[in-house]
Image (cartoon, rainbow, N blue to C red):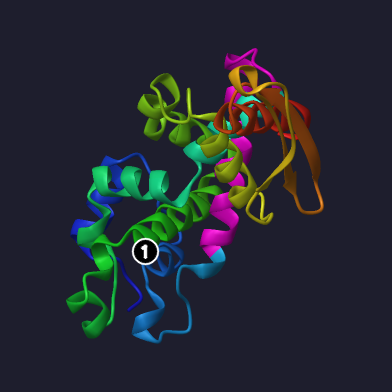
Amino acid sequence: MNQLAPETRDWLTANHFTVQDEARWIAALTHGSLGEKRDYQRLEFLGDRVLGLTIADWLFVRNPGAEGQLAQRLNALVSKANCAAVAAQLGASDHIRLGKQAREDGAAKSVNVLGDVMESLLGANFLDAGFDATRDLIRTLWASQVEGDTGRSKHPKSALQEWAAGSGYRTPEYELVDRSGPDHSLRFTVRVTVHKVGQAEATENSKREAETAAAKAFMETYG
Protein backbone atom coordinates (compact mmCIF):
# COMPACT_ATOMS: atom_id res chain seq x y z
CA MET A 1 0.00 0.00 0.00
CA ASN A 2 1.65 3.25 -1.18
CA GLN A 3 -1.18 5.70 -0.67
CA LEU A 4 -3.21 6.66 2.33
CA ALA A 5 -6.89 5.86 2.21
CA PRO A 6 -8.70 9.14 1.39
CA GLU A 7 -10.71 8.99 4.62
CA THR A 8 -7.52 8.55 6.64
CA ARG A 9 -5.80 11.48 4.97
CA ASP A 10 -8.89 13.63 5.58
CA TRP A 11 -8.92 12.54 9.23
CA LEU A 12 -5.26 13.43 9.70
CA THR A 13 -5.66 16.80 8.03
CA ALA A 14 -8.80 17.60 10.03
CA ASN A 15 -6.79 16.98 13.22
CA HIS A 16 -4.00 19.33 12.08
CA PHE A 17 -1.35 16.74 11.20
CA THR A 18 0.93 17.74 8.30
CA VAL A 19 0.90 14.96 5.71
CA GLN A 20 3.65 15.04 3.10
CA ASP A 21 5.35 11.64 2.87
CA GLU A 22 2.36 9.29 2.62
CA ALA A 23 4.48 6.16 3.08
CA ARG A 24 5.63 7.53 6.44
CA TRP A 25 2.06 8.08 7.61
CA ILE A 26 1.03 4.63 6.46
CA ALA A 27 3.87 3.22 8.58
CA ALA A 28 2.75 5.38 11.53
CA LEU A 29 -0.63 3.64 11.47
CA THR A 30 0.63 0.11 10.74
CA HIS A 31 0.72 -2.51 13.50
CA GLY A 32 3.37 -5.25 13.45
CA SER A 33 0.63 -7.89 13.06
CA LEU A 34 0.42 -7.04 9.35
CA GLY A 35 3.97 -8.29 8.87
CA GLU A 36 4.96 -5.38 6.62
CA LYS A 37 8.50 -4.03 6.34
CA ARG A 38 7.57 -0.74 7.99
CA ASP A 39 5.36 -0.37 11.03
CA TYR A 40 4.99 2.25 13.72
CA GLN A 41 7.78 1.18 16.11
CA ARG A 42 10.57 3.48 14.91
CA LEU A 43 8.24 6.47 14.63
CA GLU A 44 6.86 5.71 18.09
CA PHE A 45 10.40 5.93 19.51
CA LEU A 46 10.86 9.35 17.95
CA GLY A 47 7.43 10.69 18.84
CA ASP A 48 7.87 9.69 22.47
CA ARG A 49 10.95 11.94 22.72
CA VAL A 50 9.29 14.87 20.96
CA LEU A 51 6.29 14.58 23.27
CA GLY A 52 8.43 14.35 26.38
CA LEU A 53 10.49 17.43 25.51
CA THR A 54 7.41 19.45 24.59
CA ILE A 55 5.52 18.62 27.78
CA ALA A 56 8.60 19.10 29.97
CA ASP A 57 9.21 22.56 28.49
CA TRP A 58 5.51 23.44 28.79
CA LEU A 59 5.35 22.42 32.45
CA PHE A 60 8.61 24.19 33.29
CA VAL A 61 7.29 27.48 31.93
CA ARG A 62 3.77 27.19 33.35
CA ASN A 63 4.47 25.65 36.76
CA PRO A 64 6.85 27.09 39.40
CA GLY A 65 6.65 23.87 41.46
CA ALA A 66 9.50 21.74 42.73
CA GLU A 67 11.21 19.25 40.43
CA GLY A 68 9.38 16.33 42.03
CA GLN A 69 6.00 17.90 41.26
CA LEU A 70 7.03 18.58 37.67
CA ALA A 71 8.26 15.00 37.26
CA GLN A 72 4.99 13.66 38.65
CA ARG A 73 2.94 15.62 36.15
CA LEU A 74 5.28 14.86 33.26
CA ASN A 75 5.10 11.11 33.86
CA ALA A 76 1.31 11.21 33.98
CA LEU A 77 0.91 13.39 30.90
CA VAL A 78 3.22 11.35 28.65
CA SER A 79 2.13 7.96 30.00
CA LYS A 80 0.92 5.26 27.64
CA ALA A 81 -2.56 5.52 29.15
CA ASN A 82 -2.76 9.26 28.57
CA CYS A 83 -1.44 8.97 25.01
CA ALA A 84 -4.08 6.30 24.39
CA ALA A 85 -6.78 8.60 25.76
CA VAL A 86 -5.75 11.37 23.35
CA ALA A 87 -5.68 8.91 20.43
CA ALA A 88 -9.12 7.55 21.35
CA GLN A 89 -10.54 11.05 21.53
CA LEU A 90 -9.25 11.69 18.01
CA GLY A 91 -10.85 8.47 16.73
CA ALA A 92 -7.55 6.81 15.84
CA SER A 93 -8.95 3.28 16.26
CA ASP A 94 -10.77 3.55 12.93
CA HIS A 95 -7.53 4.20 11.04
CA ILE A 96 -5.03 1.74 12.56
CA ARG A 97 -3.88 -0.93 10.11
CA LEU A 98 -3.99 -4.31 11.83
CA GLY A 99 -3.77 -7.98 10.96
CA LYS A 100 -7.06 -9.86 10.97
CA GLN A 101 -6.46 -11.68 14.26
CA ALA A 102 -5.21 -8.58 16.05
CA ARG A 103 -8.29 -6.64 14.96
CA GLU A 104 -10.59 -9.44 16.08
CA ASP A 105 -8.79 -9.46 19.43
CA GLY A 106 -9.64 -5.78 19.91
CA ALA A 107 -6.12 -4.40 19.43
CA ALA A 108 -7.50 -1.24 17.77
CA LYS A 109 -8.90 -0.15 21.12
CA SER A 110 -6.15 -1.43 23.42
CA VAL A 111 -4.27 1.09 25.54
CA ASN A 112 -0.88 -0.18 24.39
CA VAL A 113 -1.66 0.04 20.68
CA LEU A 114 -3.45 3.39 20.87
CA GLY A 115 -0.66 4.84 23.00
CA ASP A 116 1.99 3.62 20.57
CA VAL A 117 0.10 4.95 17.56
CA MET A 118 -0.32 8.38 19.15
CA GLU A 119 3.44 8.61 19.65
CA SER A 120 4.13 7.34 16.12
CA LEU A 121 1.84 9.99 14.64
CA LEU A 122 3.78 12.66 16.50
CA GLY A 123 7.02 11.17 15.18
CA ALA A 124 5.70 11.28 11.62
CA ASN A 125 4.57 14.86 12.06
CA PHE A 126 7.99 15.84 13.42
CA LEU A 127 9.68 14.43 10.32
CA ASP A 128 7.22 16.02 7.90
CA ALA A 129 6.67 19.40 9.57
CA GLY A 130 9.49 19.93 12.07
CA PHE A 131 9.63 20.48 15.81
CA ASP A 132 7.82 23.82 16.08
CA ALA A 133 4.74 22.61 14.23
CA THR A 134 4.66 19.37 16.22
CA ARG A 135 5.09 21.26 19.50
CA ASP A 136 2.09 23.44 18.60
CA LEU A 137 0.10 20.34 17.66
CA ILE A 138 0.89 18.69 21.00
CA ARG A 139 -0.11 21.85 22.84
CA THR A 140 -3.49 21.69 21.12
CA LEU A 141 -4.04 17.98 21.69
CA TRP A 142 -2.83 17.97 25.31
CA ALA A 143 -4.31 21.32 26.37
CA SER A 144 -7.16 19.91 28.47
CA GLN A 145 -4.83 17.53 30.33
CA VAL A 146 -2.16 20.15 31.06
CA GLU A 147 -4.76 22.71 32.15
CA GLY A 148 -6.72 20.08 34.10
CA ASP A 149 -5.85 17.74 36.94
CA THR A 150 -3.83 15.07 35.13
CA GLY A 151 -0.87 14.22 37.36
CA ARG A 152 -1.82 16.66 40.11
CA SER A 153 -2.33 15.99 43.81
CA LYS A 154 -1.49 12.31 43.78
CA HIS A 155 -0.82 10.50 47.01
CA PRO A 156 2.98 10.69 47.58
CA LYS A 157 3.36 6.88 47.50
CA SER A 158 1.45 6.66 44.20
CA ALA A 159 3.45 9.55 42.78
CA LEU A 160 6.74 7.88 43.76
CA GLN A 161 5.71 4.55 42.29
CA GLU A 162 4.70 6.18 38.98
CA TRP A 163 7.92 8.20 38.91
CA ALA A 164 10.03 5.08 39.48
CA ALA A 165 8.18 3.11 36.81
CA GLY A 166 8.31 5.98 34.34
CA SER A 167 12.04 6.44 34.93
CA GLY A 168 12.87 2.74 34.51
CA TYR A 169 13.74 2.08 38.15
CA ARG A 170 12.65 -0.73 40.43
CA THR A 171 9.54 -0.51 42.60
CA PRO A 172 10.20 1.55 45.78
CA GLU A 173 10.83 -0.53 48.91
CA TYR A 174 9.63 0.58 52.35
CA GLU A 175 11.33 -0.56 55.57
CA LEU A 176 10.39 0.11 59.19
CA VAL A 177 13.73 1.08 60.75
CA ASP A 178 12.63 2.27 64.19
CA ARG A 179 9.68 2.18 66.56
CA SER A 180 9.96 4.16 69.75
CA GLY A 181 8.05 5.88 72.52
CA PRO A 182 5.35 4.76 74.97
CA ASP A 183 2.35 2.79 73.73
CA HIS A 184 0.11 5.85 73.88
CA SER A 185 2.53 7.92 71.79
CA LEU A 186 4.44 5.62 69.46
CA ARG A 187 6.74 7.04 66.77
CA PHE A 188 7.55 5.11 63.59
CA THR A 189 10.54 5.75 61.32
CA VAL A 190 10.31 4.38 57.79
CA ARG A 191 12.97 4.33 55.09
CA VAL A 192 12.03 4.20 51.40
CA THR A 193 14.64 3.05 48.89
CA VAL A 194 14.72 3.09 45.11
CA HIS A 195 17.53 0.89 43.81
CA LYS A 196 20.38 2.87 42.22
CA VAL A 197 18.75 6.20 43.13
CA GLY A 198 18.76 6.75 46.89
CA GLN A 199 16.86 6.66 50.17
CA ALA A 200 14.72 8.92 52.34
CA GLU A 201 13.42 8.57 55.88
CA ALA A 202 10.56 10.07 57.87
CA THR A 203 9.17 9.69 61.38
CA GLU A 204 5.45 9.96 62.15
CA ASN A 205 2.80 8.73 64.58
CA SER A 206 1.86 5.71 62.44
CA LYS A 207 3.65 3.46 60.00
CA ARG A 208 1.33 4.54 57.19
CA GLU A 209 1.95 8.24 57.84
CA ALA A 210 5.70 7.60 58.00
CA GLU A 211 5.63 5.80 54.62
CA THR A 212 3.71 8.71 53.09
CA ALA A 213 6.12 11.28 54.54
CA ALA A 214 9.15 9.25 53.40
CA ALA A 215 7.77 9.04 49.85
CA LYS A 216 7.18 12.80 49.85
CA ALA A 217 10.71 13.43 51.11
CA PHE A 218 12.14 11.12 48.45
CA MET A 219 10.33 12.93 45.63
CA GLU A 220 11.46 16.32 46.94
CA THR A 221 15.07 15.10 46.94
CA TYR A 222 15.30 12.91 43.84
CA GLY A 223 12.12 13.37 41.80
The image shows residue 107 at horizontal and vertical percentages of 27, 69
The image shows residue 3 at horizontal and vertical percentages of 32, 70
- SS category of the residue bearing label 1: helix
The image shows residue 22 at horizontal and vertical percentages of 40, 64
Question: Is residue 53 in the magenta section?
Answer: yes
Q: Is residue 32 left or right of residue 1?
A: right
Q: Categorize mark 1 by other alpha carbons within 10 Å: few (<14), some (14-19), many (20+).
A: many
Measured along the vertical axis of the image, is residue 120 above or below residue 129?
Answer: below
Please state the extent of the stretch shown in magenta in the rendering: 43-66
Measured along the vertical axis of the image, is residue 173 above or below residue 4?
Answer: above
Label 1 belongs to which residue?
A: 113
Where is the C terminus found, in terms of image quarters?
A: top right
Question: Is residue 154 in the magenta section?
Answer: no
Q: Residue placed at 38% from the left, 21% from the top?
A: 148
Of 203 and 32, the residue lying toward us: 203
Measured along the vertical axis of the image, is residue 94 above or below residue 207?
Answer: below
The image shows residue 52 at horizontal and vertical percentages of 59, 42
Measured along the vertical axis of the image, is residue 205 above or below residue 19?
Answer: above
Res 100 → quadrant: bottom left
Q: Majority secondary structure of the magenta segment?
A: helix
Q: Is residue 111 left or right of residue 210?
A: left
Residue 18 in sight in this render: no
